[in-house]
Image (cartoon, grey):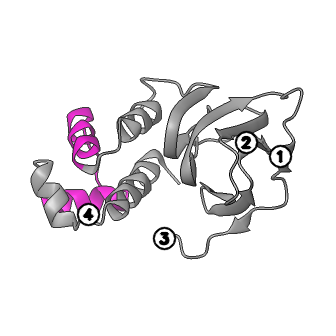
Amino acid sequence: MDNREVLGRALREARRSVRMPIAAVALDAHLSSSTLQRAETGAATLSDPDVERLDRVLGAGGGLVALYRSLMGTVRPPLFSFQRASAEAGHRWPAEWAGTVWVLVRSEESEQPSRIDLTWGPWRFGHEWPGGHLLLEDWKVPDDVSVPINVRLTRRADVIFGTGEVSPRPPHFVDLRGRWERDDQQE
């Protein structure tokens, strides 16, 4: 998968998440519908201003711009990031990174369990826990494309993405290796 396809998938997912048709997004972002449709399939190249407008129209909070600039080599993805009080969060580790990667979720404990759903490329994982600190850990190998990991939560929480070992581990810990399921519904 090349960089245009990675960006195209991210654009399509962002558009679908806000339930907007291609024509409406294209109009609001000052693009033709055919350009946006081709961009979503990886057949068209967008400019930085195009992606900035799409990010704004889709309410991506700078995520699409950061992905675009990382793919174009103008900005290297960070090893760590932090998002406060989020129901959705995402991160991209550098393509060349190899080693332990993790997601730490901090929320209030509750009588109702919290649910987290992760997607990483074509893979997905879901888990419930009683709130508090949850650490999800995996291993990343170096690759040609830095694929974003996305987190969705049933309630807002602080989400921290990082690398290396976490010590001490919180009481709610999940080793993700071998626990991912392939998302065959993803296009």
Measured Cα–Cα span from mark 4 to mark 1: 42 Å
Query: Is residue 47 covered in magenta?
Result: yes
Provide the residue designation for mark 4. Answer: 37
Residue 51 relative to residue 4: left or right: left
Q: Position of residue 37 (x, y in %)?
A: 26, 63
Which sits earlier in the primary sequence, circle 3 or circle 1? 1
Tag 3: amino acid: Glu
Provide the residue designation for mark 2. Answer: 132
Q: Nearer the viewer, mark 2 or mark 4?
A: 2
Which sits earlier in the primary sequence, circle 2 or circle 4? 4
Q: Secondary structure at mark 1?
A: strand
Query: Is residue 61 covered in magenta?
Result: no
Q: Badge 4 local density, few (<14 within 10 Å), some, or many (20+)?
A: some
In this view, the residue in front, 44 or 11, is: 11
Give, as a single range, the part of the protein colored magenta: 31-57
Residue 45 relative to residue 101: left or right: left
Provide the residue designation for mark 3. Answer: 187
Provide the residue designation for mark 1. Answer: 172
Residue 72 relative to residue 147: left or right: left
Tag 2: amino acid: Gly
Q: Secondary structure at mark 4?
A: helix
Measured Cα–Cα span from mark 3 to mark 2: 34 Å
